[in-house]
Image (spheres, rainbow, N blue to C red):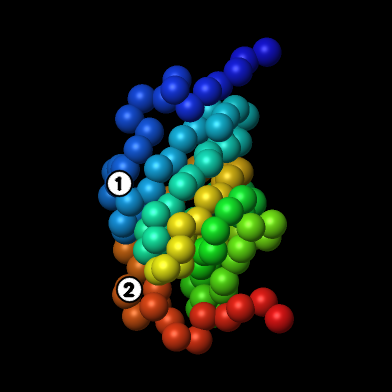
């Protein structure tokens, strides 16, 4: 048995490696094991990832707050605590907090993650962002 605690992580705060707009506080819940890595990320209001994709997909479990997610070519969707998001393999997307709320999610990433460009402000601030019905 291996127990990983947040205090075991080095440098697990802030805007690391230019994959994020704004400030988020990620920590590794489970280090990479057989191509699976589990991160818990605390996004401050307005913080969100760059566009990226996961080789074998990703599961996002929203634990707290209000966030936004978007797949390339799709609408910006609002997510809240209790929501689970499946990002299929190779589908480019971003995720993060909404402008006025923090958001905490656990991200279960399968395979390698490929990072791309920052999200345009016009996408992030899409006035048509959809609430679930
Ligand atoms: Mn992702």
Point 31% across, 43% down: residue: 14
> Looking at the image, can residue 93 be seen?
no
Q: Residues within 10 Å of mark 2 (few under 14, many from 20)?
A: few
Between 110 and 14, the residue placed more toward the observer is 14
Residue located 57% across and 29% down the image: 30
**Residue linked to disc 1:** 15
Quarter of the C terminus within the rendering = bottom right
**Which x, y percent locates residue 28?**
50, 33
Q: Which residue is mark 2?
A: 120
Q: Nearer the viewer, residue 33 or 94?
A: 94
SS at circle 1:
loop
Density class for disc 1 (Cα within 10 Å; few <14, some 14-19, many ≥20) is some
The vertical placement of 64 against 66, above or below, is above
Rendered location of residue 110, percent (x, y): 60, 43
User: Which image quadrant: the N terminus?
Assistant: top right
Q: Residue extending furthest top? A: 1
Q: Could one spot residue 18 in this view of the protein?
A: yes
**Which mark's residue is nearer the viewer, 2 or 1?**
1
Residue at position x 68%, y 60% in the image = 83
Disc 1 within 8 angstroms of ligand 1 (CB): no
The location of residue 8, given as percent across then percent down, is: 45, 20
Quick check: 34 left or right of 98? right
Instruction: Depth check: give the residue in front, 114 or 99.
Output: 99
The label on residue 100 is none
Give the image location of residue 76, x and y in percent.
52, 76
- Say which element carries label 2: loop
For residue 104, side relative to residue 23 (left or right): right
Callout 2 touching callout 1 (CB < 8 Å) = no
Q: Which residue appears at 43% of the width and 52% of the height? A: 43
Mark 2 and mark 1: span between their CA atoms? Answer: 17 Å
């Amino acid at each position: 048995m291996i127990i990983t605690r947040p205090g075991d992580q080095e440098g697990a705060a802030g805007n690391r490696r230019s994959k994020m707009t704004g400030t988020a506080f990620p920590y590794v819940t489970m280090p990479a094991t057989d191509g699976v890595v589990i991160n818990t990320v605390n996004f401050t209001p307005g913080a969100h990832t760059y566009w990226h994709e996961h080789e074998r997909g990703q599961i996002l479990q929203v634990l707290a707050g209000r966030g936004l997610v978007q797949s390339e070519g799709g609408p910006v969707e609002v997510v809240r605590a209790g929501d689970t998001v499946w990002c299929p393999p190779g589908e480019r997307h971003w995720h993060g907090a909404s402008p006025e709320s923090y958001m905490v999610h656990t991200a279960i990433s399968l395979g390698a993650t490929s990072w791309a460009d920052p999200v345009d402000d016009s996408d992030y601030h899409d006035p048509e962002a959809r609430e679930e019905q």
